Amino acid sequence: MVILRAENLSKSYQMGEIEVKALQDASFEIQEGEFVVILGPSGSGKSTLLNIIGGMDLPTGGKVFLRGEEITAYSEKELTEYRRNKVGFVFQFYNIMANLTAEENVELATEISEDPLPIGEIMEAVGLFDRRDHFPAQLSGGEQQRVSIARAVAKNPEILLCDEPTGALDFNTGITILGLLRKVNRDMRKTVIVITHNSDIAYMADRVIRMRSGMIVEDHINESPMAVEDIKW
Amino acid sequence: MVSGQKKNKSGKGFRLRKTDTMLVRMIGQSKGQFIAVLTIIVMGITTYTALNMTSVNMNNTVETYYRENNFADLFVQTAPIPGQLPEKLENIRGIRTAQGRITMDVPLVTDDGKERVNLRLITTTGSEKELDRSTLLKGKMISGKGSEVMLIEQFAKARGIDVGDKIKIQAGGVQRTLEVAAIVANPEYIYLMENGQSIMPDDKNFGVGYVPEQFGQQIAGLPGNFNEILIRYEDGVDEEALIDDVENALDLYGVRQIVKQKDQLSNSIIEQELTQLDSMADTIPILFLLVAGLILMMMLARLVKKERIKIGVLKAIGYRDRQVLFHYVKYALISGILGGALGSVLGMALAGGMTRLYLEYFHIPLLRIEFYYSYLAYAVLLSAAFCALSGMIGARGALKIAPADAMRAEAPKTGKRILLEKLPFFWKCLSFSSKMISKNIFRNKKRTLFVLAGITLTYAMMLFTSSMPDVMNQMMNEHFKEFQKMDYNISFRSPVGKEAVRDMTHLIDVDYIEGKLEYPFELTNGNKKQAVSIIGLSRDTKFYSFRGAGGEKKEIPKQGLLITENLAKALDVKTGDMILVKSYIPNRDDVSLPVKGIIKQALGINAYMDIDAMGEALLEKNLINGVYADSRDPNINEELIRAGNVASVMSIADTRAVYDEYMTLMALSIGAMVVFSGILGFCIVYNATIVSLGEREMEFSSLRVLGFSNLEIFFMIVRENTVIMVLGILLGIPTGFLMAKYSTAAFSTDLYTLDMSPTLNALVMAGVYTVGFILLAQLATYRKIRKLDFLQALKNREA
């Protein structure tokens, strides 16, 4: 079942006198429960695409549908509701609140969502139950990214959007985080979209969308996704 | 792994929302700044509550006191009138009660023959319904015929006189002994002043005593007669029309002076004090709240900028714009509510003390301190609303941050050349560090302007405050050394021929003496009226030196009047205009006299004339009713007490001594004002520096990595602030002068004209205080620089 559909998405910015085309005529479909990797070098438009899918930005042209409902037609208020209940974000630099503990950071999200998951179980699931009372400064990069994932997942969203989730981590930690995302995808049946410039991550994906210069150059199903622990870079 | 079961949100009791937890921790992490803002709010709200509550309490107390003691609406001083006349006046429409009494000033005979103590004896019937009834504080009320006296509290206290003591007076050339039957307070002498020429109460040398009616009439030599009528109106009466009726009714006997309640000396001073209290209650708190609001705006604007990514994340998670905005506004709101609550409680405690102090100062025997809890609510509401509004303005930038943009690194600010760089010659002359400082000052113009305005205000307030003693001193010197130069001002009970001047020289040892003629008149121009004393002087007087507004010398004209600036203003006349002079003496026609000049006079409201011209036009030729004298005779008072016709002797030296005592009291309130303004300056500079430090964390961290020491970085900021401070002080000078100019008008009354121009001494002192407080604020920020973790700051993406 198609959970997300993008139709002829385009986005352009005016930078001085030059018009920058960040996204051009991008169309694709994502099935419910898929682990999708959007691959591309920096400047290829993948972050712009993620922002539009996540309801953080609006396209200049084209449409995005979540379960058949057009989110690109949403008002500002509806977009907020969408972000609140339908999507979860994981950022490259974690972006967790420095003056909240690990658990409080997760609560920050659950407090406002309609159907949150039990925090204790989420903390357990991301392996931070024992460190839930620690502040970000007392956690390693990997642990901070787990908090970020816990925060995104705890809202019980339909899709998890991850922007370079391993970009700031070393190889081993990166692999652990990818494993966690895979777990969320498989065990909690969440659709996960990861954007990255690291092509090795694509081996674990169910679907790989390749981007270059704002355009989708390839969109294929990976028939035999690799186990996370087998990935190397 | 977990399933999508619903979390049970209820049943956990009260828990802070996570955004609030963040807020509370944020406040905890920036305690210094929070306390600095809070201090200003607390000061503002404390003054708001204290001043307003004191004002309401004082107004109520005075009103109740006046009502309970039947304070008269009109005071009519007359020539002797028959005892039944007041009762007849009650037939005039609009008069509820009219009551006669004798008022006479007599010297008190003391052991120290050199001092001159004036006691005003006023007759009393002791009746409950009596107008201007005294309140008994100690002893018993008198009503009989005996030689008893009830002394006003201030005077009794100052002279150590108690119930049962005996005092001696000199009346009608005879020494009499009075037994003190009671110590009383009276609404007519809340502020115990002898006359309009006195600048402040001199409790030791002027007092009021209430004696039985018959006894008073007897010693005044006016058996069965009165020389003053007190009147109370019916409600809603036309005062002017009523006064005309009273004047007509008394025309046969002669009216000396008519004083309305609003012009009654003690009452008018209290009214002035209360008006000043009200205007202070209106302005000072707003000033503090304004500064607090500006600081909050500055802090929150910076915070929003700093927390751009955090705001982006909150919005990405699904927080609404208004939730994010409110998160920051809450910071301001908390400071507003906390400051409001703390300030109003402090203010209320202070209001009790302040009201008590006022009542004690004014000798009002009522204690009506009520706590108006509504002010608590007003104060908290006022401060919360003010702070919330400032917070909203300051944090409005949070609304504009789009979550997607927030995730991207902010584009560096476009480097711009500053104004100074456009002056190549000047710019080249600057050293590298001076260039850095100049660039930093111009980097955030709004903040620089705010700090500049803060220092300007601080300096101006300090300048204004520190000028007060000098200004008062100067006023005294101008009045008593330059304007009028006599050692003694001696007034007679009744006018005598000019030759009395010669007689006086036999009585006392004088170096120089001049006769004077001083009488009250009502001066009118159109519908503007003012009761003043016209003083007749010899045209070649050595005791007065008159100067016009521009400082030019003015001579007493052969004909016509010299009038003081405040009189010219009150009557709205200029040189060349005619004034109608209305005499209170019976059977005298009104006389029109030209204004020949307008003069400066710091104390009092008067008109001056040539003594001969005055006698001829308004009284009788060759008359005097007092003398001015220079004398080194230490026993002058002793000698004058024995002179039957001497009503009062005013020594300029004594007046100055009273003033000096008053100055020590004033020093206290000046000190408080200096500390207040200092705290204001401190908080502004401290907050602005902390905000600037936060903003430049990256820059300073880079400098630290380059090898700059903490101290070097600290001095960099100090130098920037010093430039702003110097500019602020320079701007503070004209601002202080402007404030002074404005307050010259505000502080000047019929009684005195204050020229508030700041003095050199005040300029220096205000500078020293300002620099002191600002240096203190700088030192407080040094701690922050030392604590700066530059490695962490460089790692941090949020700058």
Image (tube, rainbow, N blue to C red):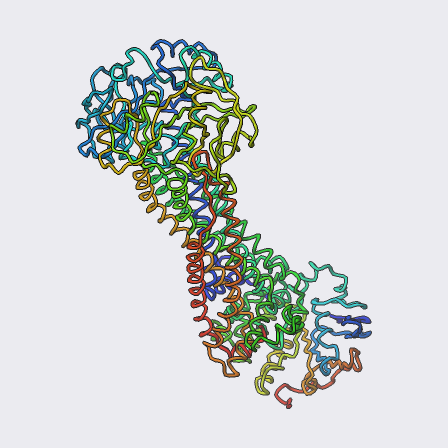
Residues B790 and B692: in front is B692
Reply above or below: B688 against B40.
below
**Is residue B430 depicted above or below B466 in this figure?**
below
- Which residue: 35% across, 15% down? B100
Q: Position of residue B30 (x, y in %)?
A: 47, 65
Q: Quadrant of the N terminus of chain A?
A: bottom right
Q: Residue at x 44, y 9 (%)?
A: B91
Describe residue A40's horizontal placement relative to residue B698 as left or right. right
| Residue B192 visible in this rendered orientation of the protein | no
Measured as percent of width and height from the top left, residue B145 is found at 22, 15
Q: Is residue B313 above or below residue B235?
A: below
Residue B297 visible in this rendered orientation of the protein: yes
Quadrant housing residue B144: top left
Query: Closest to the observer: B748 or B549?
Result: B549
Residue A7 falls left or right of residue A186 = right
Observer-nearest residue: A82 or B496? B496
Q: Quadrant of residue B642?
A: top left
Q: Residue B754: horizontal and vertical position, in percent? A: 45, 42
Horizontally, residue A147 falls left or right of residue B110, namely: right
Across and down, in percent, residue B427 comes to 61, 73
Instruction: Count numbered badges in the picture.
Output: 0
Q: Nearest the camera: B315 or B124?
A: B124
Looking at the rendered image, the quarter that the C terminus of chain A falls into is bottom right
Q: Establish if B98 lies above or below B64.
A: above
